[in-house]
Image: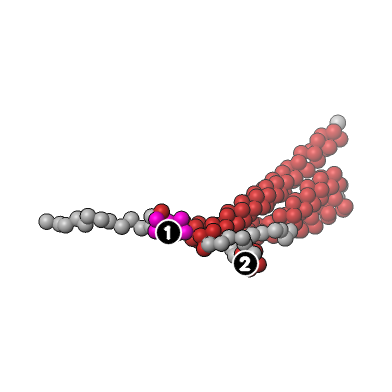
Amino acid sequence: MIQIPKTTKFGKTPQSGLRLWKAAQAIRLAELRLAAQASVLMGAQARATSMIGWVAAALAASAALAFSTPYHIAGAILLVGESITGILAVVAIYPCKWSETGTRPEVFMDSPAQTELACQESLALYYQNAIQRNIERLNTISLLISAGWIMFLATPILACLVQMVIFMQKVP
């Protein structure tokens, strides 16, 4: 017959430091989240940088179309649309305020917290705010990149349609 112990430990309890353990876990999870956000930021900036490369090539072709062919209007539309795309991409990779793991030592040292628990909870809340700031910045970057790709892909269609309308008006 198997003996079942009468008392089983279930980890930390409110009396044995559960709140301190929760604060330490919150810090650990926040640091993981901030590291993941940094990876997402690098990926988004790489996509925006790639977009700039595509825009540079497209601008050269559009300038040639606008200034040396009878398709001046289509070329001008392409130049404007691709320029807007380039601006969106540059704004997306422009250096921004970004929160990383850790904090300046003086912020932690000057904390009014008087216990280890209070310091841990303060740092956890600091990280929570940092994560939220990063989310807002990532949302902005995502919006800029999406708008840039939409502009980049829609501009040639618009230029083609406008040029077709112009040709249709010239045909008797």
Residue 171 % position (x, y): 84, 34
Q: Earlier in the sequence, mark 1 or mark 2?
A: 1
Q: Quadrant of the N terminus?
A: bottom left
Task: Residue at 71% x, 58% y: name it.
Answer: 96
Q: Nearer the viewer, residue 53 or 117?
A: 117
Residue 156 % position (x, y): 74, 46
Question: Is label 2 in a helix, a strand or a loop?
Answer: helix
Residue sticking out furthest to the top:
172
Mark number displayed over residue 17: 1
The residues tagged by marks 1 and 2 sit, at their Cα atoms, a distance apart of 23 Å
**Does 38 appear in magenta?**
no
Q: Nearer the viewer, residue 100 or 153?
A: 100
Check disc 2 and report the residue beneath it: 109
Q: Quadrant of the C terminus?
A: top right
Q: Amino acid at mark 1?
A: Gly
Magenta segment main secondary structure: helix
Q: Nearer the viewer, residue 58 or 43?
A: 43
Tell me if mark 2 has few (under 14), some (14-19) or many (20+) residues whose alpha carbon lies within 10 angstroms of its own. Answer: few
Task: Residue at 85% x, 50% y: name it.
Answer: 66
Q: Which residues are magenta?
A: 15-21
Residue sticking out furthest to the left:
1
Left or right position of 7 against 122: left
